[in-house]
Amino acid sequence: MPSRNPGVITQDWEPVVIHKSRAKGQDLRDPKAVNQALRSGAPIQTIKKFDAGSNKKAAPVVSVKKLEEGTEPVALDRVSTDVRQAIQKARLAKKLSQADLAKRINERPQVVQEYENGKAVPNQAVLSKMERVLEVKLRGKVGKQK
């Protein structure tokens, strides 16, 4: 059995200093912390962020001269009635719902609905996907079977 040291036992009484952790950035923005700092007279830094807290998208800048000349198109082109009817006929011939077609072309059902109602602005990529799934030509000569 090991023997214990019969010598003099001493204790170490050196002071241990525990430092308080620094305040995190989130804590510094807390209204309670800001009010406490104001009351105690501590310096507070405020920064105004550009466009902070707004979820608005900037409107496109249009020069006054262009507006006066009127060279810009007033309304965007919409899907023509021929394309609308071709999409509907081909979809019904394949016995697909608008949701099924949307799923196959990897778009939202609202997109297919807008194309069939004529409210959508034609997008060549979407029309290409529809052509591939429906096996109907929608661009160029409309309504021709492949």
Image (cartoon, rainbow, N blue to C red):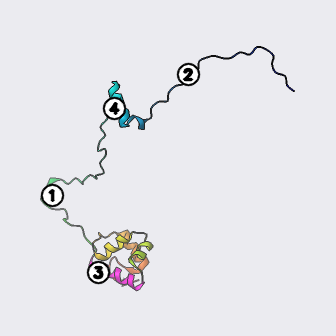
Residue identifier under label 2: 17
The residue labelled by disc 1 is 67
Left-right relation of 79 to 14: left
Residues at marks 3 and 1, CA–CA distance in whole angstroms: 32 Å
| Above/below status of 95 relative to 114 | below
Q: Quadrant of the N terminus?
A: top right
Residue numbers of the magenta segment: 80-95
Q: Nearer the viewer, mark 1 or mark 2?
A: 2
Report x, y in % for residue 142. 32, 81
- Label 1, label 4: how far apart the Cα atoms are: 51 Å
Cα distance in 3D space between marks 2 and 4: 29 Å
Distance CA(mark 1)–CA(mark 2) = 72 Å
Crowding at dot 4, Cα within 10 Å, few <14 / some 14-19 / many 20+, comes out as few
Marks 1 and 2, the one that precedes in the sequence: 2
Quarter holding residue 118: bottom left
Q: Label 1: state its secondary structure.
A: helix
From mark 3 to mark 2, how far is it between C-alphas? 83 Å
* Callout in the foreground (3, 2): 2
Q: Which residue is mark 3?
A: 82
- The answer to which of marks 3 and 4 sits earlier in the sequence is 4
